């Protein structure tokens, strides 16, 4: 029985629509293929929301598509695009046995928020998105932040505006990257903890619902 990945891709050119499919290669290799230049590729690049390594990925993809057709809106019966939120897709992924894919970022400093001890603080990253990595602009005091690995491994912290950090078990994390990386380090796999981009993989609670921090304005 082969192993492979079930993946969930998003694209800024298609808000509210996600591509959910499978590959017997790596999620990165499938992403590169999806973003290759051709006539039908969207004007902006896809990004990996999340992926999961599973056995018999083709059968699991078929089952997943059947379930999603019952509970979400499939754009085309023969295509892998669904009108659905990442949180809803993640709930389907959590029903499957397997190992969640963990992204490895080569340049950790690029994805990490500034520590208060830094001598200089830049509010605009090279992505051109202002404030995305400034927790003070994204969170409110007492707001809950969480990072999940699979079904049973979840860290929940509370944002403290006076410290501009996330507090969990009396420990202060001054960035989402450090919060998520520490969770992977302690509850999952120390070898895969380096470079965990917290903004892509964490969620914050808004009006009783958990939303991806990556999609915050």
Image (spheres, rainbow, N blue to C red):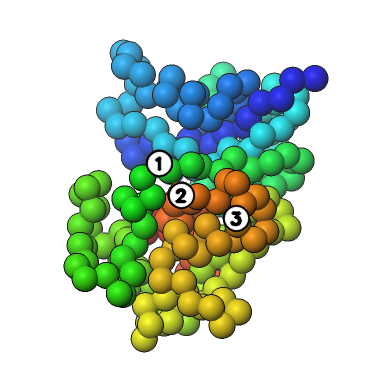
Q: Dot 2 surroundings within 10 Å: few (below 14), some, or many (20 or more)?
A: many
Q: Secondary structure at mark 3?
A: helix
Q: Residue at x 76, y 41 (%)?
A: 97
- Which residue is labeled 1 in the image? 106
In x, y percent, where is residue 85? 51, 47
In x, y percent, where is residue 111? 36, 52
Residue 113 picture quarter? bottom left
Q: Residue at x 63, y 30 (%)?
A: 5
| Residue 139 appears in the picture as rendered | yes
- Which residue is labeled 2 in the image? 195
Q: Residue at x 65, y 50 (%)?
A: 189
Give whichever of discs 3 and 1 has the lower sequence position: 1
Give whichever of discs 1 and 2 has the lower sequence position: 1
Q: Nearer the viewer, residue 190 or 168?
A: 190
- Which residue is labeled 3 in the image? 184
In x, y percent, where is residue 181? 52, 57
């Amino acid at each position: 029985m082969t192993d492979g990945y079930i993946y969930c891709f998003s694209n800024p050119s298609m808000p509210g629509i996600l591509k959910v499919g499978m590959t017997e290669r790596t999620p990165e290799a499938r992403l590169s293929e999806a973003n290759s230049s051709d006539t039908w590729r969207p004007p902006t690049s896809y990004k990996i929301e999340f992926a999961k390594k599973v056995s018999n990925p083709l059968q699991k993809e078929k089952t997943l598509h059947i379930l999603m057709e019952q509970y979400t809106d499939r754009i085309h019966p023969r295509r892998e695009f669904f009108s659905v939120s990442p949180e809803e897709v993640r709930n389907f992924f959590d029903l499957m046995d397997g190992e969640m894919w963990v992204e490895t970022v080569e340049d950790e400093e690029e994805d990490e928020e500034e520590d208060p001890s830094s001598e200089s603080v830049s509010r605009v990253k090279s992505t051109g998105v202002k404030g995305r990595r400034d927790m003070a602009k994204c969170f409110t005091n007492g707001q809950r932040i969480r990072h999940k690995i699979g079904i049973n491994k979840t860290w929940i912290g509370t944002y403290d505006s006076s410290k501009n950090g996330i507090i969990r078990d009396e420990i202060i994390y001054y960035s989402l990257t450090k919060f998520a990386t520490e969770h992977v380090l302690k509850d999952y796999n120390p070898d895969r903890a380096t470079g965990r981009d917290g903004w892509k993989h964490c969620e914050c609670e808004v009006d009783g619902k958990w939303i991806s921090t990556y999609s915050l304005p």
